[in-house]
Image: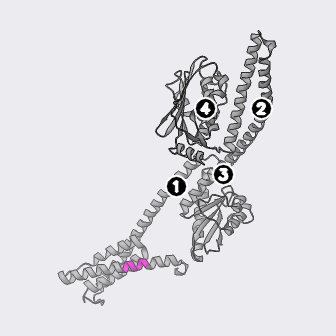
Amino acid sequence: MFRSWSKARLVKELRGVAYATLLTAAFAAALLFFVVKTALADGDVIFIIPVVIAAARWGIIPAVVAALLGAGASSYLFYPPIYSFAIRDTQEVVTLALFIFVAVVISHLATRLKRELERSRQREIDLRDLYAFSRRLAVAYDVSDIHAAIQEHLASILQRKVALFASARDALSGSGRREGVIVPDKVRVAAGEIAAGTREMNASVPVNTETGEVWLVHAVSPKTLEFGVIAIKLGHENRATVNELRVRVDAVLADATATLERLGVAHAISEARMRSQTDRLREALIGSVSHELRTPLASIMGAATVIGSAPALNGEEKLKALIYDVRNEAERLNQDIQNLLDASRISSDGINPRAEWADVADIVNSAVQRCERRLSGHRLTVDLPADLPLIHVDPVLVQQSLVQIFDNAVKYSAPTSTIAVSARASDGEVLISVSDEGQGLTSQEKERIWDRFFRGERHLTTTSGSGLGLWIASSFVAANGGRIVAESAGAGHGTRMSIALPVKVSAENQMESEADE
């Protein structure tokens, strides 16, 4: 039996035996003091205490040692002849044997109780980990999110540093889920071979690196590579410990695989991949179609402008009105196409703002100028204090956000109604607000107006739009470190959209230093 023990197990048991011996000796010394001082004649039952403590703290073997030592100490202290291990009466032999038997049984029960307590705690930890894992899976959108959840779940269960590679390409390029773990080249090659199918999926491959560290490489599931391949850092361990850990890892991964199958993770990964491919195809289609539509739209708007200003149409008010409608609809369609292009750019490439020091009044006036034709049917008021601080933003992105808000205000407010633009500095921010007297927002709409492609049900048949404008505006503002807030007293009570952008205290000083340079 002892040959199958690892060095760590042997050291642990020997340490427990040493502690049990010291504890029993301490009790024996204390009882010897009482025997001398008080002539205590019957105290052997007290040696049950170190047996129970040893069983609860260090296991069954130290507890048995404590029982044997306790029996010897009882014979020495309480059975005649006193202070001798010799036993004269056979009844005393039976009593000592019964003591050892009772002590061993109690130690066994205490050890079982300890194991049950440890199992109960482990079950609680496993349930907590499983709950956290299922929550992460519930909010996972793509394959990367699912693999991140698997990686964290396995690292939590194994209590080791774990790197997860979704494919052979990830393993060889080092782009898997590593969470700060530096994976040696030999480990990545082994993971790549398993992920590529050149090694058996159900094989645990121990890899010894140049630094002497041992890694264990294993497919998460022996049935499928959908869940990826993990590399577990074992550290500097000997062969016996590595073999013991391999057995434990195999057992843990078997349980983890059953959990993943029960939760339908393979199906979720397949759906996520399909969703990702669909998104990429949609973005490519939107980009291609949008670019193809821009050229004829530019021709239509140019032709409408030229025809509308032709002398031959003087006095032809109906024709002028038709041409005006053509140009307006072409501009609206052009804005919708621009929204699609912006949405495609945000989804595929992200937003990389080119920040510079800008004047709030310049940004607002540029946005008003761009929307001049659309705002012409409304009464516009602008209130911009002269002492507004400079802001460090990408002025083009902020201007485009304002254009989207202006367009939204025009769409959902009656002609000739007032649209008010104001700005103020407060609490380290510049607040640019656009207020209208339009159809307002319901409580449900307030929560969802920033969602992509969202449009309120009451506007679907009455107002045209794509549901992208405010989503684009919020994305552009967020890229500049700001936020957008929508306020409304309810349906039919108008809306106020406010863009809050951070103010850097050193703006003027930096402008002055740049001017000096």
Q: Nearer the viewer, mark 4 or mark 2?
A: 4
Marks 4/2: CA distance?
22 Å
> Local crowd at mark 1 within 10 Å, few (<14), some, or many (≥20)?
some
Which segment did they paint magenta? 15-21
Marker disc for residue 327? none
Marks 1/2: CA distance?
52 Å
- Residue 471 position (above or below residue 66): above
- Residue 110 position (above or below residue 11): above
Pointer 2 residue = 294
Residue projecting furthest to the front: 516
Closer to the N terminus: mark 1 or mark 2? 1
Q: Nearer the viewer, mark 2 or mark 3?
A: 2
Give the quadrant of residue 392. Answer: top right
Pointer 1 residue = 129
Q: Is residue 283 left or right of residue 94?
A: right
Pointer 4 residue = 402
